[in-house]
Amino acid sequence: MCGKVRPDGRSEMPSRSTWKLNLLAAGQGVSSAGDAMTPISLMLAFQSAGADPLLVSLVLVLGLLPSVLLGPVLAPLVDRMESSRLLQILLPLRFGVGLALAFTDHVSLILLFLFTGSAVSALVGPTMSLLTPRTVPEVKDPGFAFARVESFRSFGTIFGPMLAGVLIDAFGARTVLTLDACSFLVVAAVVTLLRVRRYPPEHARSAGRSWLAQIKAGPVSLGQDLVIAAASLSLAGAIVFTALLTVGQVYFLRTDLALSPALYGLVVSMHAVGRFLAATFLAPRIHATRQARALFLGGMAMGAALIVIGLGHNLFIAGAGFLITGAANTIQGLALRTIVTTRAAPETLGRSFASLGALNNGATLLGSLAAAPLVSLAGGALTLIIAGAGTLASTLAATRRLWQLNLAPSTEPASAPASGQTAAAGTKEP
């Protein structure tokens, strides 16, 4: 099983049934496709109506800002409630907000519902991260479960935008937004059907600490463990630079390489394909004790690929490079999630994930804001080179913690409890 490391260093695959994990992952894949369709639908609708470009940019900003501002504030709920029960509340609520968004024509209400939906999703993500490893309790390495879910989510990310374009042409944006809302009901139904439970530790639920103290426990938990702190800050620093990619690749491919819209879409899609391939074939074989080195290598690969793309000035180099950036992105994200799961205190694990999401989304916003003026000054190719160099520098700064230390869980993971237990159910995932 995945609790052992083979002589070649790879994680062994689980021998028991993983149907619960596969079903949960498939549900999240459907939701991921919907998540990819909504911003496309709104941006196209605003652009077709002749809206100000700032309004189009707000669609992207409001998808990230609630996680930064509200995620850590609301996160104590994640650590105080049983995970599946919380999801059974949040997912129907997210459906209602999405449906309201689909049938609203006023711009102010559209932005309000978009912000509200993102705030709800800021809780759904950490809660799902707590529940996911419980679907395979016999697997001691949570990285396997996270990789399986990421494989399905990446698949949804690839086909979501394609499906959105077809549906918008045929039925309009309202239909696409309605389908996205319904995708949350699909995930809610899956969670209910699986009957998988993840209870918080008994002492965490009855601690009686103030809400502010519970909020502070999230970021504090990331800083208490030196490996988690180094990994979190290293990836956040890298994200600031890799966020330049979103704007930089548009100008590099369309202006510097003068690609047609069709070729542009094909090359950009290589990033999503790389994410899918890494999540499906590579990430499940990386054992928990090797995730810190995987995070380091992922950052190095990401930085090097961006530099080569900018210097290569070639269609095929760009396609191969974006394939590598996608794979590296998946390895980085899954490695950090596994590190946090195996090392953070179980009573603050949900808040740790929420704080991590706030940190990474904040870094993404910062990089995105810097991208436009940088591209205007330096051009697309040089922006990608700067993004790569910054990513390498951020990764190398954490070399000692990510590479030289022998990573091991801070405590031994406990075996999964029966679904009716509470006191022991909050032990390490899983």
Image (cartoon, rainbow, N blue to C red):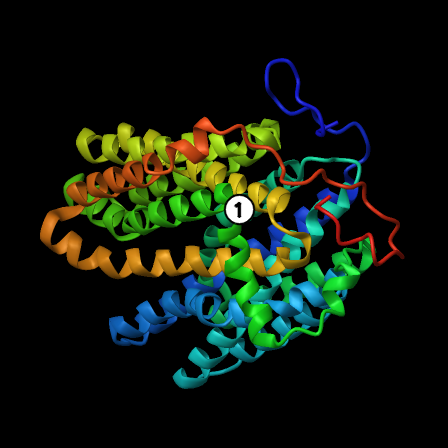
Q: Percent position (x, y) of residue 28?
A: 63, 53
| Outermost residue toward the top in this view | 7
Asked if one can make out residue 317 in the rendered structure from this viewpoint, the answer is yes
Query: Closer to the camera, 125 or 96?
Result: 125
Left or right of 314? Residue 9 is right
Q: Residue at left 34%, top 48%?
A: 237
Q: Percent position (x, y) of residue 214?
A: 60, 69
In the rendered view of the protein, which quadrant contains the C terminus? top right
Q: Percent position (x, y) of residue 9?
A: 59, 19
Left or right of 220? Residue 39 is left
SS state under label 1: loop
Identified by mark 1, the residue type is Asp
In the rendered view of the protein, which quadrant contains the N terminus? top right
Q: Residue at left 45%, top 71%?
A: 69
Query: Closer to the camera, 214 or 277?
Result: 214
* Quarter where residue 95 is shown: bottom right
Q: Is 139 situated above or below 426?
A: above
Q: Is 27 situated above or below 390?
A: below
Asked if one can make out residue 48 in the rendered structure from this viewpoint, the answer is no
Q: Is 333 situated above or below 365?
A: above
Left or right of 47? Residue 359 is right
Q: Percent position (x, y) of residue 23?
A: 73, 47
> Mark 1 packing: few (<14 Cα in 10 Å), some, or many (20+)?
some
Count of numbered badges drawn on the protein: 1
Q: Residue at left 80%, top 53%?
A: 425
Q: Which residue is mark 1?
A: 225
Q: Is 183 situated above or below 263?
A: below
